[in-house]
Image (cartoon, rainbow, N blue to C red):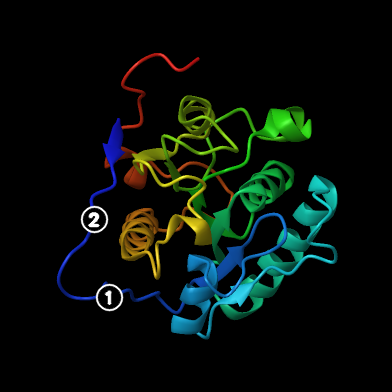
Amino acid sequence: MTQSLSPLTGARTRLEIPRHLQVLTVPGLHGSGPGHWQSRWEQKFPDWQRVEQHDWSRPSLPLWAERVSEGVMRAQRVASRGALLVAHSFGCLAALRQAALDPVGIAGALLAAPADPDKFGVAALLPAYRLPFPTILVASRNDPWMPQRTAFSWGTLWGSELVDAGMLGHINADSGLGEWPEGLALLDTLVQRIGQGGEAGTGSGPSAAWEAGVEVAPTFPYI
């Protein structure tokens, strides 16, 4: 089931990350500048960690996934449930590649505006099955990097909760989102999904608990 992303009004979004989770932001090509919502979130929550790339201008999926792996291993040393990934654009593909190689230590992932795997020739390197941890995939209707229909097709394969972001372009700094409180609300939802999953999210297998609370089905046949 696809849901629409509704603007939040009133009080600022409150988000509490349990101590057993370590949030890792995974930026896309060229990294996230100071105006990007990922950077704003890192400033708001200084205990979060960013997955840094050796070369932000070179979208090498194996190299980027290796950096995600290193971040996940560090997260496991400080948080019993491992890493909660907050990924954007090509960073989504890096996170998903690592999930295909080894999902252990990944508790969940927020996938915002994933880049089109076909444009980078990496579709065969990504999982084509339901991931063993909860994910929320957010895609806009006018994203120049990935048609929403294609993004939702992939998200259906991964078992993601699908969110229609409306006309937000690539959901980046150019989208004028500021702190993107709607995204924080989605992250809060993901934290709740992980909590419902008990000990799932460690890569040992799907969680019947969180799956029971989420109906993942396209509103029309994407594939």
Is 28 above or below relative to 213? below
Q: 209 and 134: which one is in front?
A: 134
Q: Is residue 23 left or right of residue 60?
A: left
Q: Residues within 10 Å of mark 1 (few under 14, many from 20)?
A: few
Q: Which residue is mark 1?
A: 14
SS category of the residue bearing label 2: loop
How far is mark 2 from mark 1, CA to CA?
15 Å
Q: Position of residue 145 (x, y in %)?
A: 60, 38
Quadrant for the N terminus, please: top left
Ranked by sequence position, the earlier of labels 2 and 1 is 2
Residue at point 14%, 71% (across, down): 10
Relative to 25, residue 111 above or below? above
| Total labels drawn | 2
Mark 2 sits on what residue? 7
Q: Is residue 45 visible?
A: no
Q: Amino acid at mark 1?
A: Arg
- Left/right placement of residue 171 relative to residue 203 reads left
Query: Which one is closest to the eye, mark 2 or mark 1?
Result: 2
Amino acid found under the numbered disc labelled 2: Pro
The image shows residue 34 at horizontal and vertical percentages of: 57, 75
> Left or right: where does residue 27 sit relative to residue 41?
right
Residue depicted at 35% across the width and 31% down the height = 216
Above-or-below relation of 103 to 154 = below
User: Is 41 left, or right, of 56 in this rendering?
Assistant: left
User: Residue reaching furthest bottom?
Assistant: 46
Q: SS at mark 1?
A: loop
The percent position of residue 7, horizontal first and vertical second, equals 23, 55
Q: Position of residue 29 (x, y in %)?
A: 71, 55
Q: Image point 31% across, 59% down: which residue?
A: 182
Whether 108 is drawn above or below 19: the answer is above
Q: Is residue 124 visible?
A: yes
Task: Please tell me in which quadrant of the rendered image residue 137 appears.
Answer: top left
